[in-house]
Image (spheres, rainbow, N blue to C red):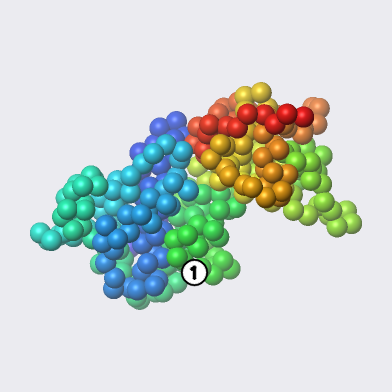
Amino acid sequence: MDWPARAASLRQWTSNGVRAPHKPLLFLYALGRYQQDAEQELAFSAVEEDLKRLLAEYGPGNRTTPAYPFHHLVSDGVWEVRTRRGAGSPGSGVRELRESGAAGRLAPELRAALRRDPSLLGRLARTLLDLHFPPSLHQELCEAAGLELEYAETLPVVPGRRSRNQALRELVLTAYEYRCAFCGYDGRIGTIPVGLEAAHVFWWALGGPDEVENALCLCSLHHKLFDKGVLGVSDEGRVMVTQRFVGHSAAAREQVLVLAGRPLLGPQPGMPAIAAAHRAWHTAQVFHGPSRPAVAA
């Protein structure tokens, strides 16, 4: 069984780029718990809050339920569910899972494969991370799921996986004149820019193109906040800050809150701005709106 290929082909509801990371998040969480205790079953009532937090932080902005992946991941052959009545999930409702004493864990065949080849766990996790989330979130997602990975591991070859455009970073930094489009940070050591990154607007992991019109030059902090949905870009090309962000320190005000309503810095004339379709995708699928009102000058 090619388990990484199976992890890469989880059946998910998709439509026009709508994010549906429910199954990958549960799979990552289950791998983390397996790493801690290979024989433990995960009672739905005991892990429900953990899964809620993962979905709230790394899923789309709309409300969702952890019962959905807990039930439906069974169909992908990597997960099993049992109740007090025996094998099989009672359904995708929270009440049914709670009242039946439902508990899940990795499928027996997968557990056996992990015992034979412990490195398989890292390859599975890396496949899920690479296909569903931007690199800026990988390490903290591992921590949230309780996973410890060796990031030097080579990713498995999955049929159909695209190759990244290695020249994109330089193209994007040039387009934005080597400064963060949100705050203007332009740090260098000698002639080498430091702390500046090319941030995809429509995530590459979900099919977004490696093109300047799908990217921003952002400092490391604002790249992370952009991928977490704290920051966004309005139709008018201004920075949006979600009302859900709370920060009382001077640093939070100066680095995040004051950005609300600020126009983007760049791109320079003659270079393509963010395509409207990519901006709309980020607003709908990543940004945790509504946005704060613009800060008075």
Please tell me how crowded label 1 is: few (under 14), some (14-19), or many (20+) other residues with Cα within 10 Å.
some
- Of all residues, the one furthest to the front in this rendering is 248
82 over 9 or under it: above or below:
below
**Measured from the top left, where is residue 238 in percent x and y?**
68, 29
Q: Nearer the viewer, residue 63 or 105?
A: 63
Residue 64 picture quarter:
top left
Helix, strand or loop under label 1:
loop
Q: Residue at x 63, y 29 (%)?
A: 293
Residue named by callout 1: 148
**Measured from the top left, where is residue 202 in percent x and y?**
56, 37
Residue 109 picture quarter:
bottom left
Q: Residue at x 29, y 46 (%)?
A: 68
- Of all residues, the one furthest to the left in this rendering is 85
User: Is residue 15 visible to the viewer in this orientation of the structure?
Assistant: yes
Name the quarter where the N terminus is drawn. Answer: bottom left
Q: Residue at x 84, y 53 (%)?
A: 188
Q: Nearer the viewer, residue 124 or 69?
A: 69
244 over 141 or under it: above or below:
above
104 over 112 or under it: above or below:
above
User: Is residue 75 visible to the viewer in this orientation of the structure?
Assistant: no
Q: Nearer the viewer, residue 37 or 208?
A: 37
Name the quarter where the C terminus is drawn. Answer: top right
- Of all residues, the one furthest to the bottom in this rendering is 116
The amino acid beneath tag 1 is Glu
**Measured from the top left, where is residue 54 in percent x and y?**
43, 52
- Of all residues, the one furthest to the top in this rendering is 236
